Amino acid sequence: MKDIKITENTLLSDNWYTLRRYTYESTLSSGETISQTREAYDRGNGAVILLYNPELETLILTRQFRLPTFINGNTDGMLIEACAGLLDKDQPEDCIRRETEEETGYRIDKVQKVFEAYMSPGSVTELLYFFIAEYSKGMKVSDGGGLEEEQENIEVLELKFDEAVQMVAEGRIRDAKTIMLIQYLQINKHTFFK
């Protein structure tokens, strides 16, 4: 497909984030011009981080209620995840440092970007920036748990790396961004766990 031209852009909802319906024309490789209509949900871009301790071979993850998973059959709606948040006009590195402290209570300095990915490109515009950072007990500055004014209720978990890998295999960790970071660390374990 080439020569994409948006012919209609209709706001459907601006309640939580923005949902729009787009009609666009494109030219197929055969030369035929077609028109299609799709909806796209714009919630902004985000960042996610996996905190690891190389000496203890542990990870910091979070657990919180996620309504969409509850609606889709996750019995209690709780999901184990890597710390993440929306950029809110920040640079990805600044965002993830802020989110890490708010959610986990750890104040980190050095973060390593490992990749970026669209998580659900068929319907959501979000581009997610993936990071890994080392943590130690000395970096703990609060209990974490999220911001009260945002009504966040986040439980902070410290797990052995091998246990987290097993939890992915058993389906106890089902969040895509978290699985991707755990698998990245598993593949590159020799670099991070010396």
Image (spheres, helix red, strand yellow):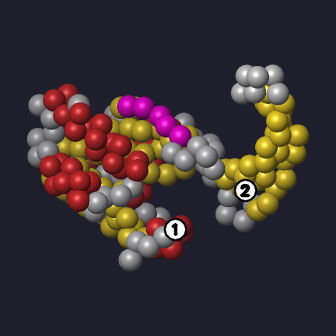
Image quadrant occupied by the N terminus = top right
Name the amino acid, label 2: Leu
Q: Which stretch appears magenta?
A: 114-118
Image quadrant occupied by the C terminus = top left
- Indicate whether 29 appears above or below 187: above
Residue beneath the point at 25% across and 38% down: 185
**Whole-percent x and y of residue 131?**
38, 38
Residue beneath the point at 26% across and 48% down: 139
- Indicate whether 13 appears above or below 138: below
**Whole-percent x and y of residue 137?**
19, 51
**Whole-percent x and y of residue 167?**
23, 57
Magenta stretch: dominant SS? strand
Between 3 and 49, the one nearer to me in the picture: 3
Locate residue 144 relative to residue 23 in the image: left or right: left
Q: Which of the numbered marks, if any, corresponds to residue 103?
A: none
User: Which residue was labeled with disc 2?
Assistant: 19
**Whole-percent x and y of residue 148?**
48, 70
Q: Is-magenta flag for residue 185?
A: no
Give the tally of numbered discs. 2
